[in-house]
Image: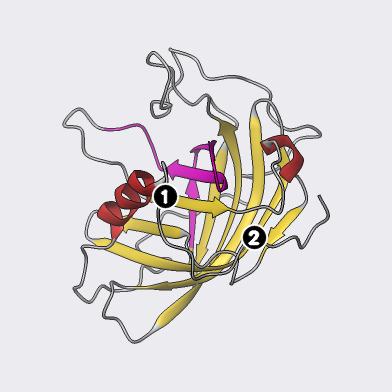
Amino acid sequence: MAPGSRPGGAGGRVVGPWALALAWCLAATAGCTEWLEVPGPASDAAVAPDATAESASLPSLGARADAPGPLVPSTPGLRVPGGYWARVRLDVADLLLPHAWAGFLETEDGLVLRIEAVGGPASGDGASPTPTLRAVVPIRLPEPAAPEALGGLTLGPEALAEAVVGLRTTPRSSWLVTPERLVIEAVGPQVVKGTLEGTARRGTRSPSSRPVRVAFVALRAP
C-alpha cells in the first residue's frame, strides 16, 4: 500500500466489534472536565539524551511472564519486556514511557489499531501508572490487508476523525488528544513502530490546546 492512503470519511457510524474499545478509551480520559495545569519541566522527570536511542535493529523479544512491564491482553499473564517504549512531547513537557504495546483487531470494516504506553507496571492497588497514553484508531482500507502491509502508511486528519486518544500525565491531569497525523513506519512479528501528532486539551471544556508529538516502538500484542 502506498503511503498517504486514506480510509473512509469521518462521517462513519461507530459500529462493529471495536465499539467497546472506543468506549474503554473514552472512559479512561473523557470524564475530566476540570481545568488542569500544563505539566512543565519542573514537574516531569528529565529524560536522559540517550534514553530512547535506537539500536541498529528493532527489538525482537516477545512478551514473557517475568518482564517488568504491564500485562499484555489476550495472553496468560505475559508482560511487556524491555526495549519497547513511547516518548511524548506535550508542549514543553518531555515524557518517557518505558513500556508500550500495540495490537490490531480485524473487523468487517478494516483494522483497528490499539496502542497503550505506560510509565511503569501497575501498582499493587490496581491503579494505572502515570504517565499513560492510550489510543484506539480505526483504519479503513480500500481493500482487505494484513497488518504487516501497513508499514509506510500515513493517515491524516480525515482518516483519524474517529480515533480516540487520551493522555494522562499525572493522576489528576488528563488530556484529550485530537490526532492529526499518524505514520505507521513498520509492522513486524514483534514490533509496531510509528509516530503520532496532534493537539491536546485539558478536558472537554478547555478553550486552549497544546501541541503533542509521540514516537513509539511498541511490542506487537496478539
For disc 2, the marked residue is 7
Residue at screen point 38% across, 58% down: 166
- Image location of residue 190, percent across then percent down: 64, 26
Q: What amino acid is labelled 1 in the image? A: Arg
Give coordinates of residue 97: x percent, y percent.
47, 45
Res 128 → quadrant? top left
Residue interval drawn in magenta: 94-122
Q: Residue furthest left?
A: 125
Residue 119 falls inside the magenta stretch:
yes
Relative height, residue 187 to residue 204 (above, below): above
Would you say 120 lies left or right of 6 here? left
The residue closer to the viewer here, 153 or 51, is 153
Q: Is residue 167 visible?
A: yes
Amino acid bearing label 2 = Pro
Q: How far is mark 1 from mark 2, CA to CA?
A: 21 Å
Residue 47 seen by the camera: no
Furthest toward the bottom, the residue is: 207
Is residue 21 toward the left or the right of residue 30 in the image? right
Disc 1 target residue: 134
> What is the quadrant of residue 154 in the picture?
bottom right
